[in-house]
Image: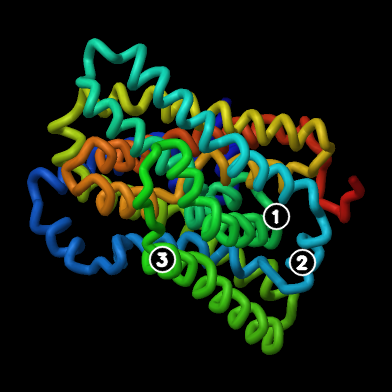
Amino acid sequence: MSDTSTHDGLGFFGKYLTIWVALCMILGVAIGQWLPQVPAFLGQFEFAQVSIPVAILIWLMIYPMMLKVDFSSIVRALKMPKGLTITCSTNWLIKPFTMFFFAWLFLGVVFRPFIPEDLAREYIAGAVLLGAAPCTAMVFVWSHLTKGNPAYTLVQVAVNNMILLVAFTPIVVLLLGISDVFVPFDTLLLSVGLFIVVPLAAGWISRVQIVKRKGLDYFENVFVKKFDGITTGGLLLTLIVLFSFQGDVILSNPAHIALIAVPLVIQTFVIFWIAYLWAKAWHVSHDVAAPAALIGASNFFELAVAVAISLFGLTSGAALATVVGVLVEVPLMLTLVKIANATRHWFVPGEAKVEAW
């Protein structure tokens, strides 16, 4: 499967993005080990468990996609129920429970000889926290790489965040039997502001002003194309920063990281295929189907990490499990992006139209 089709038009790094991602992960770990003052300095700029340097890089990745959103397309997206139904059903009625099952099966049963029982319970808890928090920010990047409908992706993410406000706590309480779970609203609200409100506002203002001055043709065919490489470059820089923070964790717990990764990897593929094949069966267009499947496959790891630390402590197994979610997400999501692009011909072509039930 060629990288070219997956990353067409995404700049110098796009063609071999998987290789560049691996190199940046290695570089990040190396910086964390040999230049620890770099992550120590960047770590000072954190608020509500959200790294501001990482947030800025993610914002740079999202902004080019938000340029393509106009409010009339958002209104049209709200009239297409199938994609939203798939996203919400997969994320809230299926994903948390399959995550619990796979985590229990592997960490509590299959790997029992290698993991102490108390630690296994903490790992399972961390996995559940990931499973109950669908992606907010990075899904815009995955949608961009699959030529997803930007307005529809925005609506899907916004609806998921509204559901998260009321569903996250009861789902975690149900699956883990913990009564004092709380949602760190500062983390949630800051993430929504940084990753949705700010880039959407910036994209809308840019669109209005540039179209007003130079016309729609210039905006769509010249200005927007200037940002083709920004998303890819931002992704690679984000990986370097993230992995520089996690270098010690990776090198000090290689065996357990590998064990924790097994159910997370299986869960990611299972959820992707459930949503993706459901969209195919419902004749949903590819520019809606791909983001719908990718939202469930990826996780709101900032929220999961914050809750794991608050409930179990910074050095707990639950916190480690959520960090493993960060480590495996990008390589897994790039694999799913490739699969989505390679199977584009399975789906209805073109921009999604108003759907009938």
Amino acid type of the residue that numbered disc 2 sits on in the rendered structure: Ser
Residue at the disc numbered 3 = 185
Q: Residues within 10 Å of mark 2 (few under 14, many from 20)?
A: some
Q: Which residue is mark 2?
A: 73
Q: Earlier in the sequence, mark 1 or mark 3?
A: 1
Dot 3 falls on a residue whose secondary structure is helix
Residue 181, image x and y in percent? Answer: 37, 51
Separation of marks 3 and 2 at Cα, in angstroms = 29 Å
Residue extending farthest to the bottom is 213
Q: Which residue is mark 1?
A: 149
Where is 77 relative to 189, above or below?
Answer: above
- Residue 11 visible in rendering: no
* Badge 2 element: helix
Compared to residue 93, the image places residue 106 above or below, namely: above
* Nearer to me, 215 or 208: 208
Q: Is residue 263 above or below residue 55?
A: above
Tally the numbered discs: 3
Q: Mark 2 vs mark 1: which is more N-terminal?
A: 2
